[in-house]
Amino acid sequence: MSINYAEKIPNNVDLGSDRQLQRALERWQPAFLNWWGEMGPDGDFQAKDVYLRTATSVDAKGWATYGHVKMPDYRWGIFLADQVKDRTIGFGDNFGQPVWQQVPGEFRSDLRRLIVTQGDTEPASVEQQRMLAYTCPSLYDMRNLFQVNVEEGRHLWAMVFLLHAYFGRDGREEAEELLERHAGDINNPRILTTFNEPIDDWMSFFSFTYFTDRDGKFQLKMLAESAFDPLSRTCRFMLTEEAHHMFVGETGLGRVIKRALEVMKELNTDDPQRIRDHGAMDLGLVQKYINFWYSSSLDLFGADQSTNAAAYFANGIKGRPDEDKFDDHIEAETTFSLEEPTEDGKDVQSIEVPTRNAMNLLARQGYSRDCDIGVVRWNRMIRKAGVDFDIRLPSDRFRRTVGPFAGFHFAPDGSPIGKDAYDSNLDDWIPSETDKAHVKAQMKQVTEPGKMAAWIAPPDRGINNNPVDHDYVKL
Ligand SMILES: [Fe+2]
Ligand SMILES: [Fe+2]
């Protein structure tokens, strides 16, 4: 079904035929706009015309249009991927049975919790990033930030639609609470820790969009497998939008690396201090941001062994990312081997667990492989410049607060290490106060079209075939 833009809330779910739902969502809409005004991008950016893409169809080819709009006028709406005819459950105990168009009573609270947790991350990231436009390295980057922000707003709409349409009164209450919790609020924080950390510099923003938005991609991929068909269709379309967010992260970090290489060549040095004195970020600094954000994003997958995850899989609520690529979709009797530290924390041993209990780990492994794709590209660029430096994802044992390695001390290369040695080395592994001060000092707003801050190279091309110096935000 095509998207109806004539309605107050653009949608492709024939909202006009369900008056009760339509009224409920039209009541939530002013609360959302209020939230956007208060917690969305700070300052007078809201009054400026931004070159944004808006979804106009759910057809993978040609699904969006581009044009200058003021953010508060963005047409947030409810878009579900087309229904797959005769779709059946793809995994677990109910494999092969028809998918559900309504929520089965016995899975109601599990599904609600999953939708609320996903929904909570969407506005959280907008709140975390609300000051970033003041320090954007270019107008192009400012535009990308706002694009990501409005789409996270739309992802909130997507989850709120499901809550209103399928969870009755509880759902309506949850939808209200999604606007009441705020990132970093001491009294009423967002649900997941990572979504309460401020993202107040662009190194963090690019790392967040590369690593944390990618966790989002994997969560959506798992929910897209769900037997609850409206959830599956909602997530499938969200994935289309999500790709750009990770593009912003990959090209952002790539441009920082490219600039570092240019400065190294220009000064004929690999001395980090000289590179920094020149206003750029050295490769070691980029590695530290990667160490920090990758390790904190791994925690978002939950414990490696989880009976909850096993139950979600058994019941058809949440599958594995790209479930069709696995041979066995039932995994009733199979086992999977995973790693845990020995009791004294000085070594690692492997143990066999039922595969169903290792669903979080399986998803996380797919995520790590996906993260590695950009790393390979960055390293190719570094090698091409003749520089001897390898960017590496840290071991998944490093700096964990969730799973079997939480509470133990491991170096980024995965080797066990004593607590004292860990503490004294940490400043060499993740951004230290000195590193952060350097990054902060480079965060100065650049808004002349086509100009870039000294620490980042220009992108290879602009947005939607426009030149890099296009007037992306009319300030
Ligand atoms: Fe999102
Ligand atoms: Fe995103």
Image (cartoon, grey):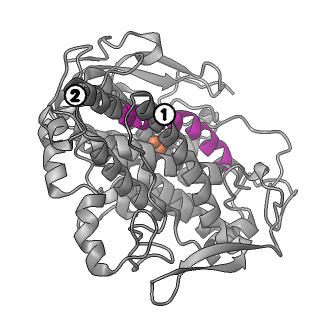
Which residue is the site of mark 1?
Answer: 380
Q: Position of residue 426 (x, y in %)?
A: 27, 65
Residue 253 lies within the magenta run: yes
Whether 325 is drawn above or below 388: the answer is below
Neighbours of disc 2 within 10 Å: few (<14), some (14-19), many (20+): some
Mark 1: amino acid? Arg
Residue 85 visible in the shown view: yes
Q: Quadrant of residue 114?
A: bottom right
* Residue occupying image coordinates x 70% and y 55%: 228
Q: Position of residue 57 (x, y in %)?
A: 61, 24
Q: Is residue 357 left or right of residue 192?
A: right
Residue 321 versus residue 281: which sits nearer the camera?
Answer: 281
Quadrant for the C terminus in the image: top left
Whether 423 is drawn above or below 33: the answer is below
Residue 457 versus residue 314: which sits nearer the camera?
Answer: 457
Mark 2: amino acid? Phe
Please, what secondary structure does the residue beneath circle 1 have?
Answer: helix
Which residue is the site of mark 2?
Answer: 45
Residue 326 lies within the magenta run: no
For this orientation, the residue located farthest to the bottom is 343
Q: Main secondary structure of the magenta part?
A: helix
Count numbered badges in the picture.
Answer: 2
Q: Which residues are magenta?
A: 231-254
Do the numbered discs 2 and 1 sit on residues whose CB atoms are within 8 Å? no
Q: Position of residue 382 (x, y in %)?
A: 41, 34
Neighbours of disc 1 within 10 Å: few (<14), some (14-19), many (20+): few
